[in-house]
Structures are given as structure tokens and as C-alpha cells.
């Protein structure tokens, strides 16, 4: 995957040609570097430059291994021996030298004989003890290691020879040379005869190379052209021009069709031909493939024994079947397996599969078998296809466009650059034209389906044979577009297959990402990941394996169970119950099929068949998921108990909550130790016992937030305070005590002050203790007194087992209250709001109060019927479950009413003193002077004094004894109309 490029500026680069990225960069010298070679077995890069030196670098660490002066003039080329520690160098000093790196890079031999610059040297791949050299003295010399004189000299070029290369195949003793006479000559180095002279370049020929895998001779020149010549016929096959100035070098990669070309302006990597192996397999498992012109065969079933592992190379006995006169570019068995067709070099030959005897031949650019082994088609030119029946020409089809290939099957397909056209084998009529770039066409057995493989994906179509035959018989088919109903789209595959085969109605394919997949009805499943590109050959039902071939002709296989494919096919045809019953019956006797139950259950789940998936699933986790999806909570609980996983229990708890099964949810969340979920369930169930247990468990586990929430919902303020103190959350504890447990506020503030003094003494001194400074906390004493009246002595809490449905000191009630209790709380709240609006500001001092009101005598003139009742006459109505102490009217100089306000959940009535107008009127109401009003409510404001002087009293309405401390609707209406 790397290209080594040496540059005229003295740098050497290693490029990743797959990603197009620069991997390594070596700054060798300021002079041109004319030659460089990889030595993979030593992890070296060896280069020669115009400073007459050879340098060796480790291409991994980039360390310089060796540098030495090799010649007295410019170095032109290097050659590395394929197995021995030898390096050949040639130079403008007309010498060739052999270096041995195992001997400290000693020069072990010098070859003299050329009379001009030595431009090129190359080892013979079939005999590495010999090598050839090219020189500007117009000769090619062949040498042997150990001899100082050449074996022989080849002469024929009229000008200097620049390059030379050996043919790598074992069937031809070829040697090619390129020279400044613009010619390329091919020599037989055994007979020393010039076999062919290739004339095609318009300038000096600077590079020649035989491709190691393809029957091509590549040549490049200073005219900027690269030409590909057939190495057998020496016909010019292709010419490349990249407009990058002169060509200086050509390199081919073994085991690949890749070719690198070096120009003045850069390097180009191209691929010639195709990378897929030329191979075929018949229905019985006989594989035939071509390596160059040699044809070999093997049986995929092998010698037997244990089943191979997926992806393992099969040790198959390989047999040489014969050879092909032309270079095979296409090889395929006939449908019945009796014949093998080979196509290449513009010709086709049909051989018998067993004896490899010639049955038929002719001119062809492409070949395709029909459904019958007696029918085939050949593409003679870009626009004409001939159909043969019983090895005799039966039909010629004029395509009307330039076809790039043909494919066989139920219909004959002709491929162009942007469309595929299907033809009827019998009449040659157009059956359907599809405007899409298609690379290959694969027909399913029986011809019911066809897959169109493109560069971006694949499309699977259904073929309606009866509709096509009826339209063709009636003449209703369009001459250009064909029959629209003949082919209908079934599904698409999003990734582009590189090769594909059909197994029933299942399409098995490989991808460029080295994935082996299969698709059934649009559902794609990954079968395996390969470590190299594979070409699919076919499927054997006898072994339940799909077979593939790599570039080196190594055969591998992967298991693909046919009952699994049939099962998926039946499911997609809506025969779910029957497919499940039959599969369970077969899987009970086959362990391999039984192992597929989980995968098929996933397949059914993807199809929305949850009931059927639950019948097949064997994986406990999947069975649990299906039980949740089907709402089977009891079954899911059993599976969760068996797995005993926190994630499983939590999933069960969430599913139970969605379905309102609080008992299952509580047990599942408890097993998962999901304290937040437990809190939610306990609160929803209004279970005080569960809250108490949760608070203890959460506190033990350090989940104090959950513990606090549980205690708060229970109304256990003391436990909340203890939890905050334990967590050293002293500020929060002090604020909570000030609001809901004023009796404990002093002690907590003292603790807070001591803790704060360790880090900030000044801030600690600023904290005020309510017990020490009651004047800073308005109503604090009254709040403590109210706490005692409501809850008894300090520290009293709920008795063990007390239900959270009863009144709680904090938080919302956990039990549903009776309707009258709800109304009572609403009325109390409304009364409190009304009193807050009527509260009067206390007098600034006694003197201002006396000046404001003066003597009480003028007030006596008011109408007694409108005067407020004295506070002492008030007897409150009893409230259920609560007996308040008699309320004593506060004196005028007392502190303002306490600010302590119990939370809404308090069932007891509030501790405020109701106004005089709320008391039931006595039999003989005494007059209430203004001073008494001021004593009870504090000094009046000027606005209130004016109102009192005008009306003589403040009418707050009457209290209905049956209205539980609430305002009657009529009273509220009259009050709202009062000025």
C-alpha cells in the first residue's frame, strides 16, 4: 500500500496510495536521487544519488543504517537480489558492482564490459543468479554472478538503451528493452533472438515493465505516454496520458493489478483490469479457476473430516486441468455444470468440464450463459450480440447503444454506462429497460428474482415471467422501454456489493468493507468479517456453507444454514406461526439450528412479531426484554430474579410503573437499590411504613437526599433535623428548625456557630441565637409556645407504626382527607388571609397613642350595636381532635403576633387569636371603647381612625357556627361592598 518516490531535489518520499497521504519523508542530499528500492525483509530503503553514494535507511525508525561511496560517477539504478544479501548498482562510470550487506557492505564483485553509461540492471526472477544490464552503448548484456564477463550481448537498438525487464511468468523466456530510438524490443533470452519490435512512442523510451499478474507489457517514454501491450499477441491494448510531462519509471505490485508511474510532475497509481479472481463453481462444488493461462480445479467438499472454521483456508487437493490459449478474463460453468466457457483476448472457447476438451469457439468480447446449457450469447462488438442455441447461431440482436458487457440468466442483460436493457432469449425483443448504472446482474435460481449490483448499492427486482410472455405474444411490448410490469422493485441494499450469489431467495454478498452479509426481503444480516477481499463462488446445501476465493486462489467457506434462510423467507411471506412450528421441530434435533434461535428471535422482533420471538428466544436477557414489551410482568420478574442484575430490576421497575403495578415496581426498584424510584412508588402509594424503611436504607447507603425526602413526606421534622446535623448541613438545619421546630433552633445555632468559628470566627460571631437574642426574632416565643401546644413537649414524635395518613407536621398529607377536612383547611387559610389584611400597626410609644386617641369617653357615644365584642367574651368552637387553650387577649405593649405559620398540612387550627367580631354575641354585649380596641389590636393608623370616627365601628360580619372558621358567602359579599 506504499509508493517509494525519489526526487530530483534530493528527497525520498513514502506515500500511502490508498489514502493518498505522505507517510515518511527523507532528506537525502542536495543533489538528485535517481534510484531507490525497498528491502522489505530488512525494513530498509536503499537509494543512490548524484553524489555517488549509496544510503540505507530504516523506513520504520528513519535511522540511517549505512552510507558509502559506491561509484566515481552518478548512480543510475539499483537492483536487490530476491533472496541473497546482494545489491547491484550501475553508474555513469560504466561499471556494475555487487555489494554484500552481510559482509559490512563490502564490494564483492565488479562487472566491466559496457563502453558507455550503464542505465539499468535487473535480476532474472526465474534465475536470480543471472541479471541483465542496459547501456547507452546500444547493447543489453546478460551476466552471471561469479563471472566478470557477460554471458552474451543483445544488439539491435540503433541508439542508447535506457531500460530492461524480465518476463515474470514461467512459460515465456522474454526480455524487454526500451531505447532512445523510440522502440521497444522483446527478446528471447534463450535463443537471443528479437521476437517483436513495438513502435508506438514518439520520444525516447525510458521505462519498460512486465506486469506480474496480467499479460501486459507496460512501456513509458519522454512523450508522457504509458502504453499497455499484450504480452502474447503484442497488440496495443491501452494507452494512458496523464499530462504530467516525461515518464521516468514504472512499478507493478505483486498480487495486485496496481501500477505506479513516475512523471516529471508527480506519481500516479492506476489499476488495470479487475481484482476479482477468474473462477467458477458448479452446483456439485467443483471449483475451476485460472492463474494466468493455467487452469486449475479442486473440489470444495474436500477430503472430509471435521467441518472447517469460518474463514479458514481449505486444504483442498488442487489439480491442473489444462491451459487456455488466450488469457482468461471470464470463466463460468454452464447451468448444468457440463461445460466451462472461457473468454479473453477477443475470443471465447467452451470446454468440457471433465476432460477439458474444446467444444466450441469463436470471436467474442463477452460471454453469457442462458437458463439452459444449450443457449448462450456472445458480444462480438459494442453494438451487436449473437445468441447461440445448441452451439449454432440462432439470433443476432442489434443493441442500438454501446454495450460494455452482457450477463446471462432468465433474460439476457446488456450493460451500458448508464442503463441496463433486458432482452428475451427467444425473440431478442426488449423486455425492460432500466436507467441506472449497473455493474453486474445476478439471477436467482428459477429466475424469480434478479439483483442489479451498482457502484453505490444494489436493487432486487421480481421478474413476472407470465406477464412478460403474454405481452411479448400479444405485441404489447414497447420496442425501446419494454414491459413495465415485467420487473418490479422488491427492496434495496444500501451498500455496494463487490460479489454476490443467490441461495434460494436470499442474496449473499461481500462488500468493499470486507463484510460478508446476506439479505432476505430487505432485512440485511452480517454473516462474517473477512481479513482480505473475497470473491463469492456459490453455496453447497450438502455442507450448508458458502464458498469464496481470494486473489491467491485460496478457498475459504462460511456456514450458512439453509433452514434459517427458509425460515426468514416464510416469515416475510406472513407465515409466521407455521415457520416457528417447523423450525422448533427441526431445531430440536439439530444443535447447530438450535444455536440460531436467538438470532431468529431478534429477526422476529425486528419484524414486530413479539409473540413469536418470545417462543424462539433462548437468551435470558432477550426473553426478559420481550416479556416487558408484551406486558408480562410476572414472567419478567421471574427472569429478573434469575439474572439478579440491577439494570434488569430497574427496567422491570420502570415498566411496572408505566402499567401502574406499584407492588411489582416497589419490589423491583428495591432489588435494584434504586432509592429515588422507591421514593416515587412509596409516595404514590402513600405508604408511611415504606417511607420509614426507605429513609433508613437510604441513610445507611449515604443517599441522604432520598432519606430526607422520605422523612419529610412522613412529616418527621426531628428526624429531618437529625439527618441534616449528621451530614453537617448546619445552616439548612438552623433554617428548618427556625421554621418548623423553633424549640431546637437555639441548640442548632450554637453548633453552627462553633463549626463556623473554626474557619471564620467573625462570621461565627455574627450569628444570632434566638434563645439569647429574642428581640431579633419577632414572634419566636409565641412560635415556641404554639409548637408546645400543637406537638407537646419538645422531642415528641410519631409513635412507631403511626400511619402517614394522619396529620403530619410538615409536607403534604399522604392520605386522602375527608371532604369536610379539606374545606376546613381552606376556610382557615381564608380567615388567616383576611386577618393579615386587617392587622393594625402597633403604636410607636404610649405618648403618641394617647395623643392619637385621647380619652375613651367620646367613643362611648357610638351605637352599642356596632361596637366590637370584648376579647374576654370569646369562647372558640371546638375542633375535631384538638382542644385549644382559652385565648387570652394580648396587651398593647406585647410583641407583634408571632410570624410562625404552620404548613398547610397542619390539621390543628392556627394559633392566632381571632378578632372580637368572630365571637358569638353574648346576651348583653358591653360597650368597647377605643382603648380596648387598641389594647387588642394595637394603635390605629390615621386612615383607620377616620374610618372609625365615620362609621363608629368596624363591621367584619357575623360568624356562622356551622362554617368551621370560614366566612359565609353573604358576609363576604357585604364585606366587599363596605366602604
Image: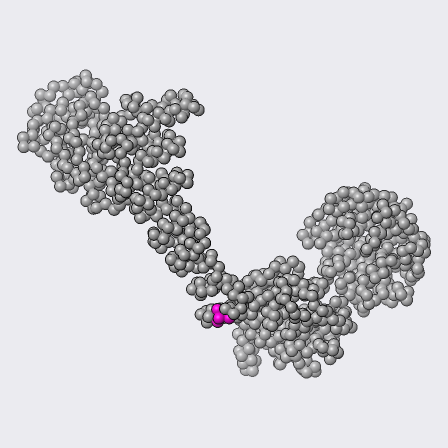
Q: Position of residue 264 (x, y in %)?
A: 78, 51
**Compared to 775, does 377 lie above or below?**
below
- Farthest residue toward the left? 924
Instruction: Report which quarter residue 179 is drawn in.
Output: bottom right
Q: Position of residue 170 (x, y in %)?
A: 81, 65
Residue 375 lies in the magenta-colored region: no
Can the viewer see residue 258 in this picture? yes
Q: Position of residue 661 (x, y in %)?
A: 34, 54
Q: Looking at the figure, which quarter contains the C terminus?
A: top left
In-front residue for pair 204/219: 219
What residue is drawn where x is 88% and y is 46%? 106
- Whether residue 493 sits left or right of residue 752 in the image: it is right
Total labels drawn: 0
What residue is drawn where x is 53% and y is 74%? 485
| Magenta-colored segment: predominant secondary structure | helix
Q: Looking at the figure, which quarter contains the N terminus?
A: bottom right
- Whether residue 313 sits left or right of residue 322 in the image: it is left
Can the viewer see residue 234 in this picture? no
**Compared to 372, does 943 lie above or below?**
above
- Whether residue 903 sits left or right of residue 370 in the image: it is left
**Compared to 918, does 311 lie above or below?**
below
In-front residue for pair 356/579: 579
| Colour setup of the view | one colour
- Farthest residue toward the top? 847
Instruction: Report which quarter residue 546 is drawn in.
Output: bottom right
What residue is drawn where x is 19% and y is 16%? 847
Residue 585 lies in the magenta-colored region: yes
Q: Position of residue 245 (x, y in %)?
A: 78, 53
> What span is colored magenta in the figure?
582-586
What residue is drawn where x is 14% and y is 38%? 971
Amino acid at each position: 500500500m506504499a509508493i517509494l518516490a525519489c526526487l530530483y531535489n534530493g528527497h525520498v518520499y513514502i506515500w500511502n496510495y490508498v489514502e493518498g497521504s505522505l507517510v515518511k519523508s527523507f532528506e537525502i542530499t542536495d543533489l538528485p536521487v535517481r534510484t531507490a528500492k525497498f528491502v522489505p525483509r530488512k525494513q530498509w530503503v536503499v537509494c543512490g544519488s548524484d553524489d555517488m553514494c549509496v544510503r540505507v535507511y530504516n523506513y520504520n525508525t528513519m535511522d540511517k543504517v549505512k552510507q558509502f561511496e559506491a561509484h566515481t560517477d552518478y548512480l543510475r539504478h539499483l537492483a536487490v537480489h530476491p533472496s541473497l544479501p546482494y545489491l547491484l548498482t550501475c553508474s555513469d562510470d560504466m561499471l556494475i558492482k555487487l555489494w554484500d550487506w552481510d559482509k559490512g557492505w563490502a564490494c564483492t564483485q565488479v562487472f566491466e564490459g559496457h563502453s558507455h553509461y550503464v542505465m539499468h540492471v535487473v535480476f532474472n526472477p526465474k534465475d536470480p543468479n543471472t541479471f541483465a544490464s542496459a547501456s547507452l552503448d546500444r547493447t543489453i548484456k546478460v551476466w552471471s554472478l561469479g563471472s566478470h564477463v557477460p554471458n552474451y550481448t543483445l544488439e539491435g537498438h540503433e541508439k542508447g538503451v535506457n531500460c530492461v525487464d524480465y518476463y515474470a511468468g514461467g512459460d515465456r523466456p522474454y526480455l524487454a528493452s526500451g531505447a532512445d530510438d523510440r522502440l521497444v524490443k522483446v527478446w528471447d533470452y534463450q535463443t537471443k533472438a528479437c521476437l517483436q519490435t513495438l513502435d508506438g512512442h514518439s520520444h525516447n523510451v525510458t521505462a519498460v515493465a512486465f506486469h506480474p499478474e496480467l499479460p501486459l507489457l507496460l512501456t513509458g517514454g519522454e512523450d508522457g505516454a504509458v502504453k499497455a501491450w499484450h504480452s502474447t499477441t503484442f497488440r496495443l491494448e491501452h494507452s494512458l496520458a496523464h499530462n504530467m510531462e516525461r515518464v521516468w519509471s514504472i512499478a507493478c505490485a505483486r498480487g495486485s493489478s496496481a501500477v505506479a508511474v513516475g512523471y516529471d510532475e508527480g506519481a500516479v497509481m492506476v489499476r488495470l483490469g479487475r481484482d476479482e479472481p477468474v473462477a467458477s463453481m458448479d452446483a456439485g462444488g467443483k471449483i475451476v479457476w485460472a492463474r494466468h493461462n493455467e487452469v486449475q480445479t479442486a473440489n470444495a467438499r474436500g477430503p472430509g473430516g471435521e467441518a472447517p472454521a469460518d474463514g479458514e483456508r481449505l486444504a483442498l487437493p488442487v489439480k491442473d486441468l489444462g491451459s487456455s490459449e488466450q488469457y482468461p478474463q471470464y470463466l463460468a460453468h454452464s447451468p448444468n455444470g457440463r461445460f466451462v466457457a472461457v473468454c479473453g483476448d477477443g475470443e471465447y472457447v467452451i470446454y468440457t468440464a471433465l476432460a477439458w476438451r474444446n467444444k466450441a469457439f469463436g470471436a467474442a468480447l463477452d460471454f453469457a450463459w442462458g437458463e439452459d446449457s444449450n443457449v448462450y450469447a456472445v458480444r462480438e462488438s459494442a453494438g451487436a450480440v449473437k445468441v447461440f442455441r445448441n452451439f449454432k447461431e440462432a439470433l443476432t440482436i442489434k443493441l442500438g447503444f454501446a454495450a460494455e458487457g452482457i450477463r446471462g440468466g432468465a433474460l439476457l442483460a446488456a450493460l451500458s454506462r448508464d442503463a441496463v436493457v433486458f432482452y428475451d432469449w427467444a425473440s431478442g425483443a426488449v423486455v425492460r429497460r432500466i436507467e441506472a448504472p449497473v455493474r453486474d446482474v445476478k439471477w436467482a435460481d428459477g429466475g424469480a428474482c434478479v439483483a442489479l449490483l451498482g457502484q453505490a448499492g444494489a436493487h432486487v427486482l421480481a421478474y413476472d415471467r407470465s406477464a412478460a410472455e403474454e405481452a411479448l405474444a400479444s405485441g404489447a411490448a414497447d420496442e425501446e422501454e419494454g414491459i413495465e410490469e415485467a420487473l418490479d422493485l422488491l427492496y434495496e441494499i444500501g451498500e455496494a456489493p463487490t460479489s454476490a450469489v443467490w441461495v434460494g431467495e436470499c442474496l449473499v454478498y461481500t462488500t468493499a468493507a470486507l463484510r460478508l452479509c446476506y439479505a432476505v426481503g430487505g432485512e440485511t444480516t452480517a454473516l462474517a468479517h473477512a481479513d482480505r477481499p473475497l470473491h463469492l463462488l456459490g453455496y453447497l446445501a450438502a455442507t450448508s456453507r458458502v464458498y469464496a476465493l481470494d486473489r491467491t486462489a485460496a478457498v475459504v467457506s462460511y456456514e450458512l444454514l439453509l433452514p434459517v434462510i427458509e425460515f426468514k423467507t416464510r416469515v416475510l411471506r406472513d407465515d409466521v406461526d407455521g415457520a416457528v412450528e417447523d423450525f422448533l421441530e427441526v431445531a430440536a434435533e439439530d444443535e447447530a439450528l438450535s444455536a440460531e434461535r436467538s438470532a431468529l428471535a431478534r429477526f422476529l422482533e425486528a419484524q414486530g412479531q413479539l409473540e413469536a420471538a418470545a417462543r424462539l428466544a433462548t437468551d435470558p436477557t432477550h426473553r426478559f426484554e420481550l416479556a416487558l414489551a408484551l406486558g408480562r410482568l410476572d414472567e419478567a420478574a421471574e427472569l429478573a430474579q434469575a439474572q439478579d442484575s440491577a439494570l434488569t430490576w430497574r427496567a422491570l421497575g420502570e415498566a411496572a410503573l408505566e402499567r401502574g403495578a406499584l407492588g411489582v415496581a416497589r419490589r423491583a426498584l428495591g432489588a435494584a437499590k434504586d432509592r429515588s424510584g422507591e421514593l416515587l412508588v412509596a409516595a404514590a402509594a402513600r405508604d408511611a411504613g415504606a417511607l420509614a424503611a426507605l429513609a433508613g436504607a437510604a441513610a445507611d447507603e449515604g443517599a441522604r437526599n432520598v432519606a430526607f425526602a422520605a422523612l419529610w413526606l412522613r412529616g418527621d421534622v426531628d428526624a429531618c433535623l437529625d439527618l441534616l446535623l449528621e451530614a453537617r448541613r448546619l445552616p439548612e438545619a438552623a433554617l428548618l428548625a427556625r421554621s418548623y421546630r423553633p424549640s431546637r433552633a437555639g441548640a442548632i445555632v450554637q453548633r453552627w456557630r462553633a463549626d463556623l468559628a473554626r474557619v471564620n470566627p467573625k462570621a461565627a460571631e455574627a450569628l444570632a441565637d434566638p434563645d439569647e437574642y429574642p428581640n431579633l426574632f419577632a414572634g419566636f416565643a409565641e412560635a415556641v409556645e404554639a409548637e408546645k401546644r400543637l406537638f407537646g413537649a419538645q422531642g415528641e414524635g410519631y409513635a412507631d407504626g403511626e400511619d402517614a395518613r394522619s396529620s403530619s407536621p410538615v409536607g403534604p398529607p399522604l392520605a386522602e382527607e375527608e371532604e369536610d377536612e379539606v374545606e376546613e383547611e381552606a376556610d382557615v387559610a381564608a380567615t388567616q388571609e383576611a386577618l393579615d389584611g386587617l392587622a393594625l400597626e402597633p403604636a410607636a410609644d404610649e405618648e403618641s397613642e394617647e395623643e392619637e386617641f385621647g380619652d375613651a369617653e367620646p367613643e362611648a357615644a357610638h351605637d352599642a350595636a356596632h361596637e366590637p365584642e370584648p376579647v374576654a367574651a370569646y369562647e372558640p368552637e371546638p375542633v375535631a381532635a384538638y382542644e385549644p387553650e382559652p385565648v387570652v387577649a394580648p396587651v398593647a405593649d406585647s410583641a407583634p403576633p408571632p410570624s410562625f405559620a404552620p404548613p398547610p398540612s397542619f390539621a390543628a387550627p392556627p394559633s392566632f387569636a381571632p378578632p372580637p367580631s368572630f365571637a358569638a354575641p353574648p346576651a348583653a354585649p358591653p360597650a368597647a371603647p377605643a382603648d380596648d380596641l387598641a389594647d387588642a389590636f394595637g394603635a390605629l393608623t390615621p386612615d383607620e381612625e377616620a374610618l372609625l370616627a365615620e362609621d363608629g365601628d368596624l363591621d367584619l360580619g357575623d360568624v356562622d357556627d356551622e362554617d368551621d372558621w370560614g366566612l359565609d358567602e353573604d358576609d363576604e359579599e357585604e364585606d366587599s361592598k363596605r366602604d
